[in-house]
Amino acid sequence: MCATCGCADGGRTRHQHDDGTWYEHDAHGHDAHGHDAGHRHEHDAGHRHEHDGGQTVTLAEKVLARNDALARQNRDWLRDRDILALNLMSSPGAGKTTLLERTARDLAAELVIGVIEGDQETALDADRMRTAGCRVVQVNTGTGCHLDAVMVREALTALDPPDGSVVVIENVGNLVCPALFDLGEARRVVLASVTEGADKPVKYPHMFRSADLVLVSKTDLLPYLDFDLARCKADLATISPGATVLPVSAQAGDGVGEWYAWLRQRIPARAGG
């Protein structure tokens, strides 16, 4: 069971490598080769254990602390290789994969982009990204609703991204739990689709508060929707004043140039040079 939100069912988490083989471990983080203590997940989030002297330990806090420590290791590993890692988050269907497909094709001559695909089941999005020319590792979380630093560390080992490349971690579609877990990324990018309504930043403030960039996606549909873009931008300015906000349409191409410019500006200097 996921230590913070109870999202896993004690089943197994599977990682599909680029050659089609699968790496699998159970909800405890154990595999056939074994993990050291630093790889293991704590369990039963929200359950509080009483110890001698009445001291209470919240396991959720322990799990997040363990995750943060592993995320720092991921971040150091990526930084040492001049790899820009993005944690791409949104609710399901906001257009993450469509945006990535267009980005990979448009920038193929300029950037090497690797993708870690997080989904509960299937490799549908991973197949799309391979067709777009990316090396991909699929992470299936079963009933889990987010990726964590352990999953990303294992996926990075399988992906083996070259120095100076970009790694996009496409998180499980969810506006709640992914915001809690640092994966070792350099930047957080959140998509808010116009089809979801303009109130999402207000309803899910933690997700948007943690964003470095908010992409208001599917803007080609604005003529057909009752979506107040000005209100959405105003709410974002209050909730996440440090975030950049860019309206985009991956289908029509509107705003993608600004998205590419934002991405280029964050490539590590030695890699970009």
Image (spheres, rainbow, N blue to C red):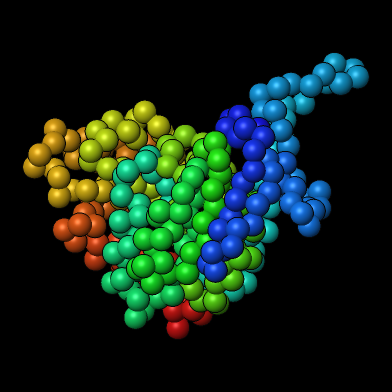
The residue that appears at 41% across and 66% down in the rendered structure is 130
270 displayed left or right of 63: left
Seen as rendered, the residue at the extreme front is 21
Front residue of 181/238: it is: 181
Q: Position of residue 28 (x, y in %)?
A: 72, 41
Q: Which of the 4 quarters of the picture holds residue 61?
A: top right
Seen in the picture, residue 57 relative to 223 is either above or below; the reply is above
The residue that appears at 19% across and 40% down in the rendered structure is 229
Seen in the picture, residue 233 relative to 135 is either above or below; the reply is above
105 displayed left or right of 51: left
169 displayed left or right of 156: left
Front residue of 8/61: it is: 8
Q: Position of residue 220 (x, y in %)?
A: 15, 50
The residue that appears at 91% across and 19% down in the rendered structure is 52
- Residue 242 visible? The answer is no
Front residue of 236/94: it is: 94
For the C terminus, the quadrant is bottom left
Seen in the picture, residue 52 relative to 233 is either above or below; the reply is above
The residue that appears at 31% across and 71% down in the rendered structure is 105
For the N terminus, the quadrant is top right
Seen as rendered, the residue at the extreme right is 52
